[in-house]
């Protein structure tokens, strides 16, 4: 039985449809991350699950129980807001103790739970500190402790790390994942940051204008974006219309090899930067000029190159640091079929 | 996603709201609308039919025209003067931390609760011919100018309390952020703080306008027979001339004016409404720094002394001025039962406190429920209109002549099951009517500024809607609630216009006792009146000071 | 947790208070009725006063306890009574005077009752002697008062008659009350009507009537304020309130005001600080009556009898600073020593007042106020 099941959940704000017949299952102990740009309906999804917004159509099931008409405070879910929303009139302890108090825990039990959670989030003994004096990272930890304190059956995180600086975010996201694994928490998080989503989630759900564009493991989604929208949202730029004939496709950049078994006919093609191979030696391939390069990737071991080809739109390539050509050099580009993806037409119309 | 309609969906929200509104609505219907309608109908319904032609007769009377014009311009001028002169005070008392701040805050509120009879004579003694200032060589100040000054004296506290209450909770970092972006101090204030304060300033200005528009005692005493506001005219027509048709027409005119005002106000507030990250008031005040800030502080304190303290001091001086020089003769006389009263005048103190306490409780319950109902997230346009109408209805008692309410009580609440003619509860009921608008107006800006998601956070953590209110709204609104309670208590203590008609002879309130003492010749009576006024003033100051000292709780629940 | 508890307690207390307050008021009614007809309710203006001993004596004699309801000054108390006449607040109303008598009688406020002891009251005060709807209780003279010290200091003779007041030596000295809103104000207007009569334009300048007199008074700098309190305490230099700030040594007040000024003085002064211009007086007669539809008419009748009894009449002067109507009632010493008896006050026939009061006040307002 799924911990959370959404069946054709629809939410409208006036004429705008924020959630359009969304189906989603989250298994127990699973960490699911909803990824999407702002306005894609991901926060509304959390609010519908939490009961803060009754769906206009469809059902929300928690542990097999239909939640229609169940008030937020009876749903037993936790929700961590993007800007934490700590209670300003209470200290750290008062914030964390809030949930247990609402669930009529005894005083001793509450105190024990508060201490335990503050230890867990790395703020031991912070009970008496006023929340207004906390740094952003500390606030985030308190908000997490507060959300976990009443032992929710489902923990929902709305842009959990959105307001923190990058290095803190990268460290915290790993801590969070380890913590949730250890506690066995079922988590539904939403974020617009694919790095965060991929680091945190067992499964990623990409949303586009109220609909689910793709669901899959981080690797699956990364390797095989289902649509041009997903591809572009993940940051891929090498996307062109193409026509497949056998093992190659006709593109504005000339002929590009495609994976075996690709059906023939017109399609949209993505070439991941890793599949774009620039060579400084002249030879067969697409002549390009290097216009810019940036460091990227873990430990900055890779460079991203921006190429201006003789034909077709700009190309993005990635290559190891040592082999990177200087801007201004002319290179010859070949393509690797392994990194060429034929995109579905799912939401293509929406991407101009 | 902030725009999402309410917790738990429309239908339930509406039901909860209606349930919350039911109590205040019933209260107002029974103790306000019904009596006022009864007395108005007496004037316009005769010989088995209505007489709309009386409107034309009354409104074309040139005397009444003069009254309308005077009412309007003096209210506008008084409001402008009060807001301008009190804004610096609101700022200093909200943001500067200095020794004696609480005492000063209590002092500025004292005038607000004094009976107008007393204040009027204090102002005459100060400004009038042969008054203190006149003896020092300044020309006597009478008529409209004296009225305006007395209005500032009375309403200074409204601006300080309502605007200052919000000001203290605005995050100073927002203004700092604007200054870092290159805005001058003034520009930062104008672009960041002023818009955030606008609802409170509008609320305060509206309240002051309403008070001065319906000003009674001050105008009656300082204006003499030549200057009359609508309220004074309604009083004359009702209480002295028993010309109910004229009084009814004027009452309805005043209603219409007040309703129009409230509509303007509602629009202003709606336009400016928004979440303005409120912070704990305790954290925003700091010691003044630099010559400029000290100068501002000193200037404000001087202003308060001249405008508010000196007239109060005249009262005290007169209460101590006995037959053999200064002494406590008049205070001692308050304990004796012979003379004017069936009871010793000092018993009025106890009566007043008891009445005011009950009135405050009623006003807090009624006004609190109403404010909560009004802050529930809006669900649907029709409900929105209903809510706005309700909001306006709550303010109407402020725009209604006390004599209308007092006489209305007598003729409307005279039959079982509500035969209250000689019941003591009439007094706190009438006083609560004036208190409710204060409670609502003080609570609303603060409750509306509470971030909805804070409530949602509490709901998701397992707090039921009622619990959310208690755990989230109440702590944030506690300060405002105390301010509201203080105001309700204070106006209840000072209420005179309606109380004088319904208080029992053996249980007079302080203002009624003061008026009764002033109604007789004799040095002793006059001295006792001043002594009672001084006591009233001290009692109010003590209550307000106690409220100031209630700790703003930030330690949390454990 | 403690705070929560306290808060919950607070909320509960609030609720209980409100509920109990509301039930208490509902509950108080039956208990009143339970006392049967043992209580008699007197509705009066807020100047009514009687000493405890005297009220206790009434209870001893008749078995009734008096409950007093007051409703503002004389004018508004009467108007309240008229408004609530279908369902009156009490049994007896006290405090309608000869200037407003017609308003009370026309409205049918009172039920006739001939009080015991009425024969002891001079006929000139018994204005409703045919029907006995009202019983005279006290009289008072509205007179111009003067500040002795002020006139002594300047060696000017204080005025004594209405004619004096328009003399140049008294320019800018007099403050009077609004005749439309104040009982002494109306009284003083009536004094001038009695003295000068209805003038009208036709009778030439010599007559001019009361309107002509007021024009002269206005030219002589009379000041009009709304009520007696403001006139007496704020503007009159001879009162204890006005001795610091008052700027006018002449005021329209009562003949009994000088004794009131020295009532508590110790040692008793040679004479009161203020005096009375005896030629400026108008006599007010105050009445009480049994309210139509009274709950306890028998008690009300007993109370009316009591109001004209010797006991009450003797107590009254020092309580309300008015003169008793019962012949042979002894006046307290402070009255005889410091007060003036006005042998020949101005009067206007009740019918004439009834007929013209509103027109006079309107004319007066346009002459003097606007």
Image (tube, rainbow, N blue to C red):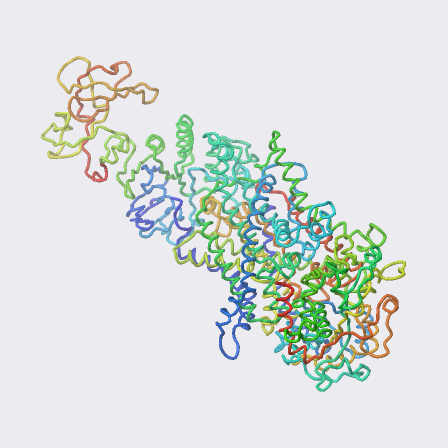
List the single residue furthest toward the left.
A245
The image quadrant that residue A227 belongs to is: top left
Judge whether B277 appears above or below B182 on screen: below
Report whether C336 appears left or right of C114: right
Q: Residue furthest bottom?
A: C130
Q: How many marks?
A: 0
Q: Taking B199 as reference, is B387 above or below it? A: below
Q: Position of residue C33 (x, y in %)?
A: 67, 76
Q: Is B337 positioned to the left or the right of C102 in the image? A: right
Residue at the image position 84 percent from the left and 73 percent from the top: C314
Q: Nearer the viewer, residue B46 or B360?
A: B46
Q: Is residue B160 left or right of residue B514?
A: left
Q: Position of residue C322 (x, y in %)?
A: 79, 71
Q: Image quadrant of residue A188?
A: top left
> Residue sitting at 63 percent across and 34 percent down?
B295
In the rendered structure, the answer to whether residue A105 lies left or right of residue B527 reads: left
Q: Report whether residue B70 is seen.
A: yes
Q: Work out whether C122 lies above or below B296.
A: below
* Residue B222, image x, y percentages: 66, 56
Asked whether B257 or C274 is in front, the reply is C274
> Of residues B298 and C141, which is closer to you in this image?
C141
Q: Quadrant of the C terminus of chain C?
A: bottom right
Q: Quadrant of residue B100?
A: top right
Residue C41 shows in this picture: no
Residue B72, x across and y down, in percent: 54, 56
């Amino acid at each position: 039985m799924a911990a959370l099941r959404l069946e054709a959940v629809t939410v409208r704000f006036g004429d705008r449809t924020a959630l359009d017949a969304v189906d989603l299952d989250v298994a127990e102990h699973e960490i699911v991350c909803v990824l999407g740009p702002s306005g894609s309906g991901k926060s509304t999804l959390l609010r519908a699950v939490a009961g803060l917004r009754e769906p206009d159509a469809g059902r929300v099931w928690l542990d097999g129980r239909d939640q229609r008409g169940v008030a937020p405070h009876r749903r037993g879910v936790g929700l961590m807001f993007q800007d934490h929303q700590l209670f300003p009139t209470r200290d750290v302890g008062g914030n964390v103790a809030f949930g247990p108090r609402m669930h009529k825990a005894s005083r001793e039990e509450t105190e024990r739970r508060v201490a335990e959670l503050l230890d867990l989030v790395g703020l031991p003994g912070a009970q008496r500190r006023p929340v207004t004096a906390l740094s952003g990272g500390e606030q985030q930890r308190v908000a997490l402790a507060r959300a976990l304190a009443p032992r929710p059956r489902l923990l929902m995180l709305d842009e959990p790390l959105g307001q923190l600086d990058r290095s803190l975010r990268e460290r915290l996201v790993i801590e969070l994942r380890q913590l949730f694994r250890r506690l066995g928490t079922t988590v539904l998080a939403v974020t617009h940051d694919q790095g965060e989503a991929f680091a945190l989630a067992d499964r990623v759900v990409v949303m586009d204008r109220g609909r689910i564009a793709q669901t899959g493991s981080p690797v699956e989604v990364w390797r095989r974006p289902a649509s041009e929208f997903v591809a572009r949202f993940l940051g891929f730029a090498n996307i062109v219309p193409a026509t497949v004939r056998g093992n190659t496709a006709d593109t504005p950049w000339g002929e590009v090899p495609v994976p075996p078994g690709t059906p023939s006919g017109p399609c949209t093609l993505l070439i991941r930067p890793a599949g774009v191979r620039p060579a400084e030696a002249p030879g067969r391939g697409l002549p390009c000029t290097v216009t810019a390069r940036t460091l990227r990737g873990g430990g900055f071991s890779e460079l991203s190159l921006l190429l201006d080809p003789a034909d077709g739109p700009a190309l993005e390539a990635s290559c190891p640091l040592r082999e990177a050509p200087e801007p201004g050099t002319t290179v010859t580009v070949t393509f690797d079929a392994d990194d060429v993806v034929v995109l579905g037409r799912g939401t293509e119309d929406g991407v101009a | 996603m902030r725009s999402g309609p309410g917790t738990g969906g429309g239908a339930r929200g509406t039901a909860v709201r209606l349930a919350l509104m039911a109590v205040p609505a019933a209260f107002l219907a029974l103790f306000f609308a019904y009596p006022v309608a009864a007395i108005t109908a007496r004037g316009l319904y005769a010989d088995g039919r209505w007489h709309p032609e009386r409107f034309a007769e009354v409104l074309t009377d040139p005397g009444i025209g003069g009254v309308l014009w005077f009412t309007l311009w003096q209210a506008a001028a008084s409001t402008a003067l009060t807001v301008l002169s009190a804004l610096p005070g609101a700022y200093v008392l909200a943001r500067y931390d200095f020794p004696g701040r609480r005492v000063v805050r209590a002092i500025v509120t004292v005038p607000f609760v004094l009976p107008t009879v007393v204040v009027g004579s204090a102002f005459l003694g100060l400004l009038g011919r042969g008054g203190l200032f006149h003896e020092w060589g300044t020309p006597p100040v009478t008529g409209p100018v004296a009225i305006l000054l007395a209005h500032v004296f009375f309403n200074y506290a409204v601006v300080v309390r309502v605007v200052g209450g919000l000001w203290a909770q605005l995050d100073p970092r927002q203004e700092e952020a604007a200054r870092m972006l290159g805005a001058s101090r003034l520009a930062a204030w104008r672009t960041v703080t002023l818009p955030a304060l606008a609802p409170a300033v509008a609320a305060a200005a509206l309240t002051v306008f309403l008070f001065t528009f319906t000003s009674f005692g001050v105008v009656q005493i300082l204006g003499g027979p030549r200057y009359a506001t609508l309220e004074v005219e309604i009083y004359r027509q009702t209480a002295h001339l028993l010309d109910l048709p004229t009084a009814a027409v004027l009452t309805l005119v005043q209603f219409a004016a007040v309703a129009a005002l409230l509509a303007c106000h509602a629009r202003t507030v709606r336009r400016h409404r928004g979440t303005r990250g409120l912070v704990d008031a305790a954290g925003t005040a700091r010691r003044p720094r630099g010559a400029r800030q000290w100068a501002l502080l000193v200037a404000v304190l001087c202003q308060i002394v001249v405008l508010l303290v000196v007239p109060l001091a005249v009262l005290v001086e007169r209460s101590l001025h006995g037959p053999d020089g200064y002494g406590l003769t008049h205070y001692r006389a308050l304990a004796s039962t012979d003379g004017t009263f069936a009871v010793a005048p000092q018993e009025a103190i106890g009566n007043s406190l008891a009445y005011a306490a009950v009135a405050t409780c009623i006003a807090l319950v009624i006004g609190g429920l109403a404010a909560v109902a009004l802050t529930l997230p809006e669900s649907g346009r029709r409900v929105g209109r209903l809510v706005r109408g309700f909001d306006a209805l709550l303010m109407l008692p402020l725009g209604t002549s006390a004599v209308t309410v007092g006489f209305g009580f007598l003729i409307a609440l005279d039959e079982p099951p509500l035969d209250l003619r000689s019941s003591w509860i009439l007094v706190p009921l009438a006083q609560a009517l004036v208190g409710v608008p204060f409670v609502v107006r003080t609570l609303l800006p603060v409750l509306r500024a509470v971030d909805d998601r804070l409530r949602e956070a509490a709901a998701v953590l397992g707090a039921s809607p009622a619990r959310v209110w208690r755990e989230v709204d109440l702590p944030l609104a506690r300060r405002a609630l105390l301010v509201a309670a203080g105001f309700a208590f204070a106006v209840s203590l000072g209420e005179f216009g309606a109380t004088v008609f319904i208080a029992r002879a053996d249980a007079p309130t302080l203002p009624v006792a003061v008026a009764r003492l002033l109604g007789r010749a004799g040095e002793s009576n006059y001295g006792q009146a001043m002594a009672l006024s001084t006591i009233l003033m001290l009692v109010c100051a003590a209550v307000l000071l106690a409220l100031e000292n209630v700790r703003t709780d930030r330690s949390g629940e454990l | 947790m403690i705070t929560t508890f306290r808060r919950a307690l607070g909320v509960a207390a609030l609720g209980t208070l409100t509920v109990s307050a509301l039930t208490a008021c509902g509950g108080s009614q039956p208990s009143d009725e339970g006392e049967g007809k043992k209580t008699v309710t007197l509705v009066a203006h807020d100047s009514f006063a009687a000493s405890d001993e005297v009220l206790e004596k009434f209870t001893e004699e008749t078995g009734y306890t008096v409950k007093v309801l007051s409703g503002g000054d004389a004018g508004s108390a009467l108007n309240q009574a008229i408004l609530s006449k279908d369902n009156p607040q009490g049994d007896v109303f006290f405090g309608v005077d000869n200037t407003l008598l017609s308003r009370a009688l026309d409205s049918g406020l009172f039920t006739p009752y001939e009080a015991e002891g009425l024969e002891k009251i001079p006929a000139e005060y018994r204005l409703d002697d045919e029907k006995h709807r009202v019983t005279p209780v006290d009289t008072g003279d509205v007179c111009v008062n003067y500040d002795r010290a002020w006139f002594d200091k300047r060696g000017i003779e204080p005025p004594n008659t209405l004619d004096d007041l328009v003399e140049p030596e008294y320019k800018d000295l007099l403050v009077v009350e609004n005749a439309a809103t104040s009982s002494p104000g109306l009284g003083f207007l009536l004094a001038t009507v009695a003295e000068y009569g209805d003038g009208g334009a036709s009778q030439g300048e010599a007559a001019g009537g009361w309107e002509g007199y007021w024009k002269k008074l206005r030219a002589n700098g009379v000041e009009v304020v709304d009520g007696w309190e403001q006139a007496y305490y704020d503007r009159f230099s001879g009162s204890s309130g006005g001795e610091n700030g008052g700027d006018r040594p002449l005021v329209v007040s009562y003949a009994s005001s000088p004794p009131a000024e020295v009532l508590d003085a110790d040692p008793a002064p040679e004479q009161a600080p203020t005096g009375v211009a005896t030629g400026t007086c108008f006599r007010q007669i105050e009445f009480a009556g049994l309210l139509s539809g009274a709950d306890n008419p028998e008690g009300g009748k007993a109370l009316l009898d009591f109001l004209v009894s010797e006991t009450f009449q003797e107590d009254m002067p020092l309580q309300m600073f008015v003169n008793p109507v019962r012949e042979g009632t002894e006046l307290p010493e402070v009255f005889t020593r410091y007060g003036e008896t006005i042998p020949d006050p101005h009067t206007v026939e009740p019918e004439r007042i009834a007929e013209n009061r509103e027109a006079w006040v309107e004319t007066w307002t346009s002459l003097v106020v606007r």
